[in-house]
Amino acid sequence: MSRPRIGLALGSGSARGWAHIGVIQELAAIGVEPDIVCGSSIGALVGAAYVTGKLEALGDWVHTITWRGIANLLDVRFSGGGLVEGERLIGFLSELYGDAAIESLARPFAAVATDLDTGREIWLKEGSMTEAVRASIALPGLFGPTKLGDRWLVDGGVVNPVPVSPCRALGAEVVIAVNLNGDLIGKHSSAGAASRVKTESQKQRPELLEGLMSNIPSVIRGGAGVIAERLLGAGSDSPGYFDVIFGSINIMQDHITRSRMAGDPPDVMLTPRLNQIGLLEFNRADAAIKEGRNCVRQMLPALKSAMGHST
């Protein structure tokens, strides 16, 4: 008997998305090779690395990244619809993916983005991989939108945080989905969680703030320093800009995911336990990847059942 066509839906979740690397590695270890890959936001970035054969290179890089390295990818402009212009990130993605065209790849792939004017979900299934991923990761409030054709596009997680539907549309018979935000909601409202988020912001402040300031012209650096401290919530008991933006996005994506999964559930849902990793903690790849692998091992019976015991 031939095995079913497997779709892998990689969800949004910012720095927690490095868990996708561990998921893909562990699936390969048990003999599961997705035929179709779809991603929203960070899921699109990791999924694109996988289908272009660059997952190992991405994994090597994320194991070494520091707060300063993160800041160096963020060209702060305070204009253009976001705090970050994104040109440096595009350069990094271009180097990672090369000049790959999505339609030329061996596996069908789609990056999910959101049309800023209509609110429609857009599946980017052809054209430049770099441009598709840049559109899919354009997190509102942080990155400016990306213009493709006559559309302005923002983060795919705004409309489809766990992209099961494009996997099915591209021909998947069994869909394995990865939800990075499944254990977050409810914890943010507790005093302990608020304190944890605050501690994370203060812990990340020195290197990140210094790196961000190096990207701003010296003539305005003094005033910008005050702004940046407020963005990170430093020196205050109230949440910072990033705390509010990312906390609100967590809530929004959790509600959207629950609604969409009720109407179109995956065959297997993988939910890594990532509450301890902040949305900007891209330097914690080791912990995220380890948890990605762990969640696959824990769901092995469900995976075997979905594959018809072919794993």
Image (cartoon, rainbow, N blue to C red):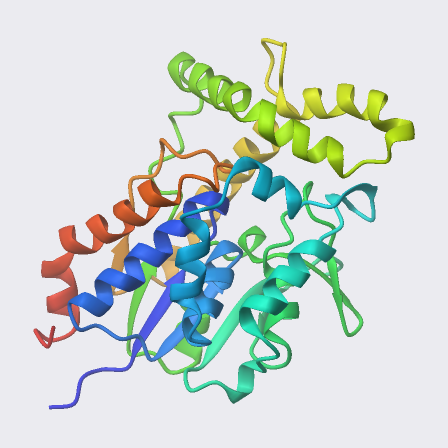
Q: Nearer the viewer, residue 69 or 118?
A: 69
Location of residue 311 with respect to 244 vertically, above or below: below
Numbered label tally: 0
Please indicate, yes or no, whether residue 77 appears anywhere in the rendered image. yes
Q: Residue at x 17, y 73 (%)?
A: 31
Examine the image and state in which quarter residue 246 appears. Answer: top right
Location of residue 228 with respect to 191 vertically, above or below: below
Q: Nearer the viewer, residue 171 or 299?
A: 299
Is residue 12 rendered to the left or right of residue 187?
Answer: right
Q: Nearer the viewer, residue 46 or 216?
A: 216
Examine the image and state in which quarter residue 174 appears. Answer: bottom left
Residue 151, image x and y in percent? 76, 67
Residue 28, image x and y in percent? 23, 69
Is residue 271 rendered to the left or right of residue 117?
Answer: left
Q: Residue at x 9, y 60 (%)?
A: 301
Which quadrant is home to the N terminus? bottom left
Q: Residue at x 66, y 69 (%)?
A: 131
Location of residue 311 with respect to 227 vertically, above or below: below
Residue 40, image x and y in percent? 50, 59
Location of residue 71 with respect to 276 vertically, above or below: below
Q: Residue at x 11, y 67 (%)?
A: 304
Is residue 224 rendered to the left or right of residue 298?
Answer: right
Please indicate, yes or no, whether residue 162 appears anywhere in the rendered image. no
Residue 222, image x and y in percent? 84, 21
Examine the image and state in which quarter residue 241 appears. Answer: top right
Which quadrant is home to the C terminus? bottom left
